[in-house]
Image (cartoon, rainbow, N blue to C red):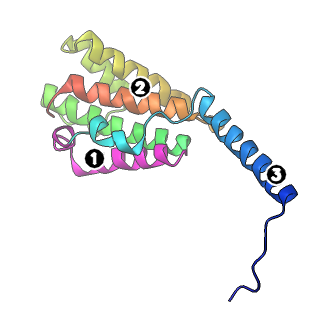
Amino acid sequence: MFGPPVNLEYRDAQKLTQDARTWISSILGVYAVSGTALIKEESIDAILPDDLLSRLDEMTRNDLKDALTCILLLIPTPAVMICFRATENILRRYYSKLTGKSASSKSWAELLKELEQSQQLKPPLLGYLRYLKDKRNEAEHPDKRFSQEESERIFLQIKGLLDEIGPL
């Protein structure tokens, strides 16, 4: 079917061995660099357990899953942008829950300012919201790109925010 058998000569085997060592060395080098993916597919259930996902509306749940997909595929900037979309939705829902008022006509900054002034936020929760707002402001610059490490850190900050908020 493929023609007569071809024997690998010694010098070809040596070259193949050297190429394989170079490839393995390159792969190990990539994973040794800071910023390489830490979130793995095997850890998704631990990061986003069903009880946490069930507390979210469908749009936020899908955004977080999409952000994770981007992280796993090593495309960090889109992951971060989707994370900020999910965070803003979380903030709007939390604001409405705490104040009983609609959040639809207010900016992220206005929502955060009102929540700060109400003094209903615990310091860790305020810290998450400030950090994410600052990062979101950075993302507004057209030249801003995020590293894999930054995308994972931002995603984990959102997870921390959700843990602090509790049921929405």
Quarter of the image for residue 104 reads: top left
| Location of the N terminus (image quadrant) | bottom right
Q: Quick one: SS at disc 1?
A: helix
| Nearest to N terminus: mark 2 or mark 3 | 3
Residue at the image position 82 percent from the left and 51 percent from the top: 14
Tell me where the magenta segment starts and ends, as one range. 50-74
Q: Is residue 29 visible?
A: yes
Mark 2 vs mark 3: in front:
3
Q: Is residue 140 visible?
A: no
Q: Which residue is mark 2?
A: 132
The question of residue 10 being in magenta is answered with no
Task: Answer left or right for 164 relative to 17.
Answer: left
In percent of width and height, residue 86 lies at 34, 40
Q: CA distance from mark 2 to mark 3?
A: 52 Å
Q: Which residue is mark 3?
A: 14
Q: Amino acid at mark 2?
A: Leu
Q: Nearer the viewer, residue 28 or 68?
A: 28
Q: Amino acid at mark 3?
A: Gln
Q: Which residue is mark 1?
A: 61
For the residue carrying disc 1, how many other residues have a C-alpha within 10 Å: few (<14), some (14-19), or many (20+)?
some
In percent of width and height, residue 7 lies at 79, 70
